[in-house]
Image (spheres, rainbow, N blue to C red):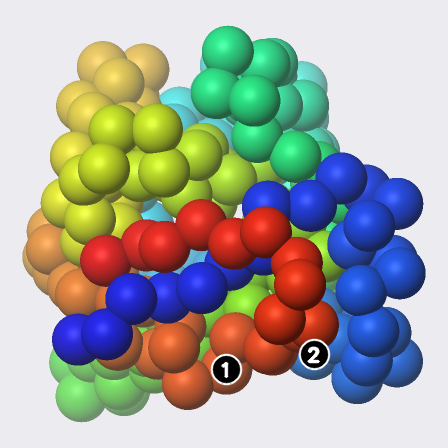
Amino acid sequence: MSAISLANLTPREQLRAGRLTYRIAQLLIGLALYGVSMGFMIRSTLGQMPWDVLHFGLAQNLPLSIGQVIIAISFVVLLLWIPLRQMPGLGTVANAIGVGLATDGVLSILDAPSGAAARLGFMTLGIGLNAVATSLYIGAQLGPGPRDGLMTGLSRRTGLSIRLVRTVLEVSVVALGWSLGGVLGVGTVLYALLIGPLTQQFLPMVTVRLDASEPVVQLH
């Protein structure tokens, strides 16, 4: 796998780096697909995404919906960006707010399937869509979402692969979410193990190339 070139830009540079209309469209598609993927995973009842194990555990103990918890946790995670010197952007803000709203919206119209095969299909589709969605909005280079910015920031600062960093983060979040009463399942385990490698595969395909003069970070 070749290195992934993601520009390390300030918010202003992100907006002035070219191909803005295309990049915003890719960002919005990615965020929409992310909300859909979360809805499919939750409705499969075969295990939530690792971060959703935490979100669900918190929602069980707070007068908030899962979407509202997602938004709150997003801004908490952004505080962890400070020591990593990770640059936010339009995509960061859109993700912090939009994914939570999209997830609540999808859950309001998507019913849980009946039958093991349908549930398995929901789980599989959720994992695949999430990897594509993650790659799309990171690749738009308008700033990653809070959680994925933590992933890329740690990868850049430590030199470790996205695959390894993502897997470690997901497993850690599962443990914390479970301790708070979150629900685990086979979908949780498969997501934690597969999302890193899948994102590693999809991200080079959809990363929008900017001007050669822009500074880049090489993620392996």
Give the image location of residue 181, x and y in percent. Answer: 29, 21
Whether residue 104 is visible to the viewer of this picture, yes or no, is: no
Disc 2 to disc 1, how far (Cα)? 9 Å
Residue 161 is situated, as x and y percent measured from the top left of the image, at: 20, 48
Above or below — where is 145 with respect to 179? below
Category of crowding for the residue at label 1, using alpha-carbon neighbours closer than 10 angstroms: few (below 14), some (14–19), many (at least 20): some
The quarter of the picture where residue 208 lies is bottom right
Dot placed on the residue nearer the N-terminal end, 2 or 1: 2
Tell which tag, 2 or 1, sits nearer the viewer. Answer: 1
Instruction: Say which of 40 and 142 sits in front.
Output: 142
Q: Quadrant of the C terminus?
A: bottom left
Q: Amino acid at mark 2?
A: Gln
**Residue 140, quarter of the rendered image:** bottom right
Q: Quadrant of residue 85?
A: top right
Give the camera-side residue of 220 and 116: 220
Helix, strand or loop at label 1? It is: helix
Identify the residue at image location x=81%, y=80%.
19
Image: 130 above or below 117: above
Badge 2 marks a residue whose secondary structure is helix
Say left or right for 201 vs 5: left
Q: Name the spot of residue 114 as percent of width and height, x first.
A: 31, 81
- 189 or 96, which lies in front? 96
Q: Which mark is residue 206?
A: 1
The kind of residue on which mark 1 rests is Val
